Image (cartoon, rainbow, N blue to C red):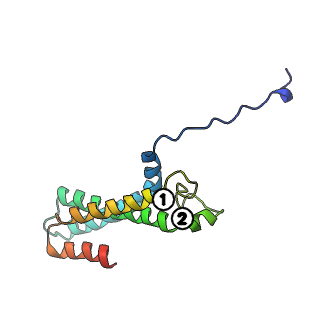
Amino acid sequence: MPLNKIKPLNPVKIKKISPIYDLIKLGRLKFLVYSALSYTLGMTLCLYADIENINLNSYILGLVLVWSIHLMTHYCNEYYDLEADKANLSFTKWTGGSRVLANGDLNPNMSISAAYLLLFLTTALGLFLPNFGSKLILFGGLFLG
């Protein structure tokens, strides 16, 4: 059979793995590296300045709080920018959102629900911060910022 007579295969449609996969994709995890790097730099400066009460537990608690706030911001941004993301035809890997909501892969209510869940998680974890000053910064930023 001549090559020009061969019909191309139909593209394989990949089934959605799960809404969990879409929620993870919605979070744009690649950006969490940057918040982890900046947080780690700050903790390193604290160690260098010989600030007391810096240990592995406080580092991990702080990093989880930073990531929780960062993810909450992503989920809120995806929800509130939905119409703009739908209209944006020149998006890139770095701009225009994750495209999960814009493409209709996930209900937008999942995004805002995840954001509120992370807000409650951050609030609960914030109670374990070591002093009043750090709690004031966290809660002031969350609820006033």
Q: Is residue 86 above or below residue 2?
A: below
Q: Give the image location of residue 12, x and y in percent.
A: 63, 35
Pointer 2 with pointer 1, Cβ within 8 A: yes
Q: Which residue is mark 1?
A: 108
Residue 20 in picture, x, y percent from top left? 42, 46
Which image quarter holds the N terminus?
Answer: top right
**Cα distance between the residues tagged 2 and 1:** 8 Å
Front-most of 97 and 40?
97
User: Which quadrant, please, contains the C terminus?
Assistant: bottom left
Left or right: 1 as drawn, with respect to 86: right
Residue 44 quadrant: bottom left
Residue 96 tag number: none
Which mark is first along the chain, 1 or 2? 2
**Residue position marked by numbered label 2 in the rendering:** 82
Callout 1 amino acid:
Pro
Kindly identify the residue that appears in the image at 56 percent across and 63 percent down.
Answer: 96
